[in-house]
Amino acid sequence: MSQLGTPMVDPAVERRANRMMMVILAVICALLALRAVVGSSVGSGDAAVTEHGFGMVYVQEAKKGFVAEQSKEKAADGTEVEVRRWKPAAPGQAPEIAWTEWNEVTAGEWAAAQRAQAAASASAPVVTVSWPRTAGVWFAALMTLAVLSFLWRDNPVYKLAESVVVGVSAGYWMIVATWDTLVPKLAGALVPAWTKAHLMPSLESAGVDWWGLVPLGLGMLLLCRLSARVSWLGIFPLAFVVGTFAGLRFVQNVESDLVAQVATMFEPLVVVKHQALAGADAAVAAPIDWAGSIGASLSAVLILVGVLSVLAYFFFSLEHKGALGRTAKVGVWYLMITFGASFGFTVMGRIALLAARFEFLFDDWLWLIDPSGKH
């Protein structure tokens, strides 16, 4: 044991672990090299082509063109006004606005396009490899393996992947906050004309809203937390944000949890459901749906018993003895079942995410499986 109480790692064990990790990495690299040499047969029938590689993304060129169309429409006051609308250009018509899109296609479509191009077919669509998207697939696969390397132990590769994820997430949410909050709600409120002309053409504003100075001032005061001399000024916007958030969350929780839970207490314990009839039989008295009625009634009784027993468990003014103690024990069962179901649901969600990552590795990257017929 070290002076801090942490167990010391035997250097021999550390060296063996490092050698084992190097062997595993060498085996993975050898398998990847073998996978690249063996290649994959993409397409089917006469259009089948052997592609030496994997993790490729193919795209097809799609040209878009639009022309302006003038039409007259009636305004709200009844006058006719000229309206300019854009419509797709007809074949052979020169577009006024045009651009090129690259839509992702399957490897089979790429194989058919390769055979058509080899036959010098003028009508063959342009299908090629998208190297940026291919690099994205490889980067995502390597980052996935880097995160999974934590199963071996904490290592520099995992730390790099962790830093990349945190940095990209922070940058992404900063951009989202800028364009979803700062630009439309701050700049759009104070300088709407300039914002519409230079930043957000789709902005709809009735004019300058001077109330936008309030969040601007609070934000400037919040930046005072960066200076030790005037950091006390940042307390006011923090108090405003915390108080407003607490008030909003209080109302939401009361409406969604407390009121909804109390409302279920006033539902009838005996529920009678009838079978749905259609056509001429709708006018006849529908027979009782006994299975649905029993299930709904049992659900109402279980909710009532659960609410009362859990409230009894958290009632600490009296000692849990007698009827109160037995009711509290029923509440404990309800709590344990709820916690177990929540934990199981969380585990199932994580397992689903893990299965999705493995499917990405074996399908999009390695091309070992093809459940959706992309290869």
Image: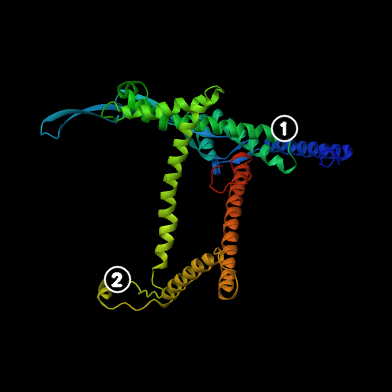
Query: Label 2: which residue?
Result: 278
Q: Position of residue 305 (x, y in %)?
A: 50, 71
Residue 204 coordinates in the image, percent (x, y): 29, 30
Foreground residue, 40 or 1?
1
Q: Amino acid at mark 1?
A: Pro
Q: Is residue 303 toward the left or the right of residue 286 in the image?
A: right
- Report the quarter where the N terminus lies: top right
Q: Is residue 339 shown left or right of residue 28? A: left
Please rate how many residues cluster around mark 2, counting C-alpha atoms within 10 Å: few if below 14, some from 14 to 19, many from 20: few
Q: Earlier in the sequence, mark 1 or mark 2?
A: 1
Considering depth in this image, is 255 or 320 the residue closer to the camera? Answer: 320
- Is residue 97 visible to the viewer in this orientation of the structure? yes
Q: Secondary structure at mark 1?
A: helix
How far is mark 1 from mark 2, CA to CA? 67 Å
Q: Which mark is residue 284?
A: none
Residue identified by numbered label 1:
156
